[in-house]
Amino acid sequence: MSGFITVGKIPAPVVAKAQSLLCQRPRKLAGGRGVVINVGLRYRLFRPCGSAQFQLMTHERYNNVAAKNRNH
């Protein structure tokens, strides 16, 4: 497959851009919650701690997931 899964409806150009950004080094999140690559202003590639695959999602969904992980 492409190295990541899409969460929700993601436009094809954003998926193509995310595919090209997979070779970049991801940014580690504080507290060991995972790593993230910014795809643009509205999309993130997020890999939670313990997961082997990135998830492409909107920044709103990413904020909700990151906040949920922050509270645990």
Image: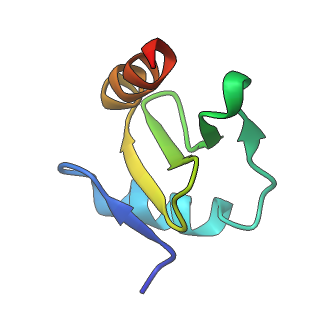
Q: Extreme left residue here?
A: 9
Give the vertical position of 28 relative to 45 (above or below): above
Q: Nearer the viewer, residue 2 or 15?
A: 2
Residue 12 vs residue 63: left or right? left
Give the vertical position of 36 relative to 14 (above or below): above
**Residue 41 x %, y %:** 51, 27
**Residue 40 x %, y %:** 54, 37
Residue 3 visible? The answer is yes
Q: Extreme bottom residue here?
A: 1
Which quarter of the rendering shows the N terminus?
A: bottom left
Residue 24 vs residue 32: left or right? right
Q: Would you identify the image quadrant in which residue 28 lies?
A: top right
Residue at the image position 46 percent from the left and 79 percent from the top? 2
**Residue 72 x %, y %:** 45, 20
**Residue 37 x %, y %:** 64, 44
Residue 65 vs residue 37: left or right? left
Residue 4 vs residue 29: left or right? left
In this picture the colour scheme is rainbow
Residue at the image position 31 percent from the left and 59 percent from the top? 6
Give the vertical position of 46 relative to 29 (above or below): below
Q: Extreme right residue here?
A: 25
Count of number-bearing discs? 0
Residue at the image position 65 percent from the left and 64 percent from the top? 22
Q: Nearer the viewer, residue 3 or 34?
A: 34
Q: Nearer the viewer, residue 55 or 19?
A: 55
Residue 29 visible? The answer is no
Q: Would you identify the image quadrant in which residue 4 lies?
A: bottom left
Give the vertical position of 49 relative to 31 (above or below): below
Residue at the image position 58 percent from the left and 47 percent from the top? 49
